[in-house]
Image (tube, grey):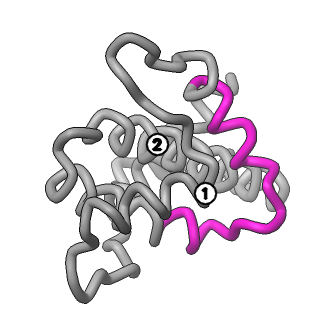
Amino acid sequence: MKEARLLLPLILLLVVPMTAQIEQAPTPEQCRADADAWGIPKWALLVPNDNEFRSLPGVMIHNQAVSAKTLEARNAEFAQCEKTDSALDVRYARAARAYAIAELARMGDFMERHSLTGQFYQEDEQGKR
């Protein structure tokens, strides 16, 4: 049931346009500094830190200091960093996935708290997409 609850926010996340705009692409140095400051695990082919990346969504879901808008803005930066710092593109891609999962989980929790999940399924069954 938890997986189904996460589908609606995924749809919303894909439909809602990105609100965070990056004026200028960050440099590789800026990307690395931001990822370090935001607690993104290091990435290396020999030491991929899979467990740290697996736990990152859970950490971000409950991080009261980081808003959903901040998660979205950081994801926009990660997308740029994947292009400008190709040496560590996997690090940014995995971080972006973790942040997206955290944001979707928060949306799902919001829908559940406000009893919107049933309405979503009802409207979806009616073809309202």
Q: Residue 1 has which mark?
A: none
| Image location of residue 34, percent across then percent down | 49, 63
Q: Is residue 80 visible?
A: yes
Identify the residue shown where x is 47% and y is 61%. 33
* Residue 66 within the segment the image draws in magenta: yes
* In this view, 55 is above or below 91: above
CA gap, disc 2 to disc 1? 10 Å
Principal SS element in the magenta part? helix
Pointer 1: residues within 10 angstroms few (<14), some, or many (20+)?
few
| Image location of residue 99, percent across then percent down | 53, 48
| Left or right placement of residue 59 versus residue 40 in this view | right
Which region is colored magenta?
Answer: 54-72
* In this view, 43 is above or below 85: above
Q: Determine the image quadrant of residue 89.
A: top left
Pointer 2: residues within 10 angstroms few (<14), some, or many (20+)?
many
Tell me the element at label 1.
Answer: loop
Residue type at tag 1: Trp
Residue type at tag 2: Ala
Which quarter of the figure is the N terminus placed in?
A: top right
| Image location of residue 29, percent across then percent down | 33, 63
Which quarter of the figure is the C terminus placed in?
A: bottom left
| Left or right placement of residue 91 versus residue 62 in this view | left
The reply to whether dot 2 and dot 1 touch (C-beta < 8 Å) is yes
Q: Which residue is the site of mark 2?
A: 95
Q: Could you tell which of marks 2 and 1 lies nearer the N-terminus?
A: 1
Q: Which residue is the site of mark 1?
A: 38
* Residue 71 within the segment the image draws in magenta: yes
Tell me the element at label 2.
Answer: helix
| Image location of residue 71, percent across then percent down | 55, 63
